[in-house]
Amino acid sequence: MEEKMQELNRVTEHISSHTVFHIGPIPVSSTVVHTWYIMAFIFIVVFILTRRLRSGAPRGAQNLLEMYVEFIYGLMEPALGKEGRRYLPLVGTLFIFILFLNYSGFVPNMVPPTTDLSTTAGFAIATIIAVHALAIHEKGIKHYLAHYFQPFWFLFPLNIIEELVKPFSLAVRLFGNIFGGKMVFSIIFILVPFLVPTPVMLLEVLMGAIQAFVFSLLTITYLSMLSKGH
């Protein structure tokens, strides 16, 4: 029992980010290093899948790519219409990147970078900045600013607060679910190492996909709100 308690105490230490090395005075954490691994892996996979693309009837890996593109289009079109397809690079990249980060926890000795609030906060802030930049490009600065005074001018402070809350909501939702899932799985695996963790692992697979889906869907919703108004 005492050995189990010591292992439980080490769970949080294992999940928590730690400094791996320094670049000059700048510390590089395990979260950053693991993110670099996933980025390199995605780059290699995408390079392999896209090096033989051709027009006409798709074959082999191109089928998978086109199925993925159609899946993202299916998410965007109800909110943004056909013209929303131009946002594919943003939404498609977010979904696949977050999905791979969430699933990286199944690699031995690797902790999902999305269990670190700094990662999810970075995703959230970058996404909201991109959404607002696209809205300004789409509507022009005058119409973009006008939406803060809709439907009534006195709601301006509430509309500003709403925009400030969005990145916080995105970051905490993704972090909380992935961190909590990883923590629960680690604890169950220590206490009951055989068979019982299997359904929990399947649940973690499902949760990783759901959180990537939710983050992407909320991004689409924010794009729709800013491009088409409240």
Image: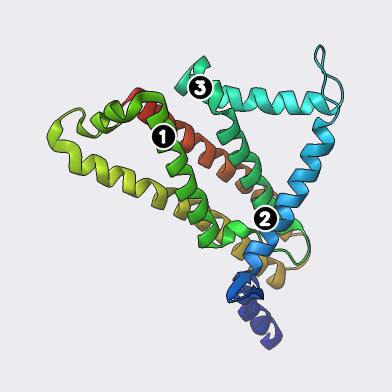
What residue is shown at x 17% (from left), y 37% (from top)?
155
Residue ID for mark 1: 222
Is 53 left, or right, of 226 in this rendering? right
Q: Which residue type does callout 3 highlight?
A: Gly
Residue ID for mark 2: 200
Residue ID for mark 3: 84
Specify the quadrant that holds the N terminus: bottom right
What residue is shown at x 56% (from left), y 35% (from top)?
90
Q: Residue furthest bottom?
A: 2
Q: Which comes before the other along the chain, label 1 or label 3?
A: 3
Q: Which residue type does callout 2 highlight?
A: Val
Q: Position of residue 29 (x, y in %)?
A: 62, 69
Q: Secondary structure at mark 1?
A: helix
Is 137 left, or right, of 185 in this rendering? left
Q: Secondary structure at mark 3?
A: helix
Q: Which residue type does callout 1 highlight?
A: Tyr
Alpha carbon of mark 2 to alpha carbon of mark 3: how far? 37 Å
Is 121 left, or right, of 165 in this rendering? right
Alpha carbon of mark 1 to alpha carbon of mark 2: how far? 32 Å
Q: Residue furthest front?
A: 24
What residue is shown at x 60% (from left), y 65% (from top)?
183
